[in-house]
């Protein structure tokens, strides 16, 4: 009995440590290389002295603007996300049936056994089912985050990515964004709406004590998972 108890404690300890490793392994960290800004690509140019005070490599055209268009440029993305979804379902079924069997007749009268029992019989059944379900979800995210251009696609579209971390009491909050946008959708002040970002991946979350208090424990998650046999 004692050996079984020790084995149970050892298995529980392994399960707890395994769950803890799974939970902490995926926690986001600042300065993630997958969201690091891209460095501008430097191209070597042969500068030919002409005596002019303007250089072709550093001067902008009179038709150019401040909008991002090359790797390493920054763009301010205005977060304006709002989603709302609802679903309801209702099912109701009902079925009833009855069957009767007349008694035996002999000489125009019902045959009785024991002076009071006949062969008359009746059967009936009733079956009903009623189910109703409702689900709803609403999300909203507003704010602003600056991201960098990490790649210019052959068609001119820009791949962007970036993150923002805010340090608060007993924890951090972060916003991460990746996606693709058209240079034409960038406003004159070098801002773009998040609704214009294609294939957008927007993450908003937190770490630390404040975020941990909103997470269920591993045992509670187990009893609410598909692995719960009860």
Image (cartoon, rainbow, N blue to C red):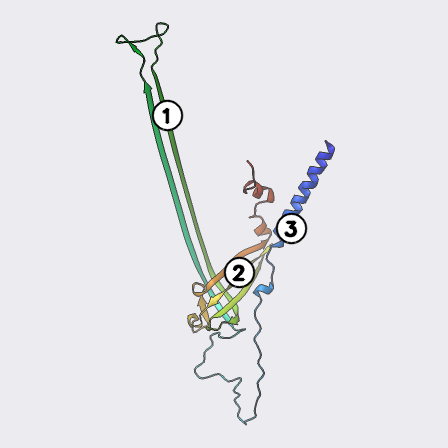
Which numbered disc covers residue 21? Answer: 3
Label 3, residues with CA under 10 Å away: few <14, some 14-19, many ≥20: few
Q: Which residue is most to the front?
A: 107
Which type of secondary structure does the marked residue at label 2 adopt?
A: strand
Which numbered disc covers residue 125? Answer: 1
Which numbered disc covers residue 175? Answer: 2
Q: 202 or 7: which is nearer to us? A: 7
Label 1, residues with CA under 10 Å away: few <14, some 14-19, many ≥20: few
Can residue 169 be seen here? no
Can residue 215 be seen here? yes
**Residue 59, image x, y percentages:** 50, 85
Q: Does residue 110 appear left or right of residue 230 in this picture?
A: left
Badge nearest the viewer, 3 or 1: 1
**Residue 133, image x, y percentages:** 41, 41
In whole angstroms, how far apart are the C-alphas of marks 3 and 2? 24 Å
Mark 1 vs 2, N-terminal side? 1
């Amino acid at each position: 009995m004692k050996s079984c108890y020790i084995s149970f404690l050892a298995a529980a300890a392994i399960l707890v440590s395994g769950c803890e490793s799974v939970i902490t392994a995926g926690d986001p960290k600042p300065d993630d290389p997958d969201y690091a800004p891209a460095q501008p690509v430097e191209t070597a140019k042969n500068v030919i002295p002409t005596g002019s005070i303007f250089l072709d490599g550093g001067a902008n055209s009179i038709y150019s603007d401040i909008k991002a268009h090359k790797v390493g440029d920054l763009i301010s993305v205005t977060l304006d996300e709002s989603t709302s979804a609802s679903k309801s379902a209702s099912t109701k079924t009902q079925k009833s049936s009855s069957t009767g069997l007349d008694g035996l007749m002999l000489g125009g009268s019902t045959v009785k056994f024991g002076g009071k029992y006949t062969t008359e019989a009746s059967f009936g059944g009733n079956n009903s089912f009623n189910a109703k379900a409702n689900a709803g979800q609403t999300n909203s995210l507003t704010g602003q985050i600056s991201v960098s251009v990490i790649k210019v696609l052959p068609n001119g579209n820009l791949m962007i990515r970036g993150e923002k971390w805010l340090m608060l009491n007993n924890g951090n909050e972060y916003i991460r964004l990746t996606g693709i946008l058209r240079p034409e959708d960038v406003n004159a002040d070098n801002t773009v709406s998040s609704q214009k970002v294609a294939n957008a991946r927007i993450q908003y979350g937190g770490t630390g004590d404040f975020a941990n208090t909103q997470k269920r424990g591993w045992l509670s998650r187990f009893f609410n998972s598909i692995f719960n046999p009860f």
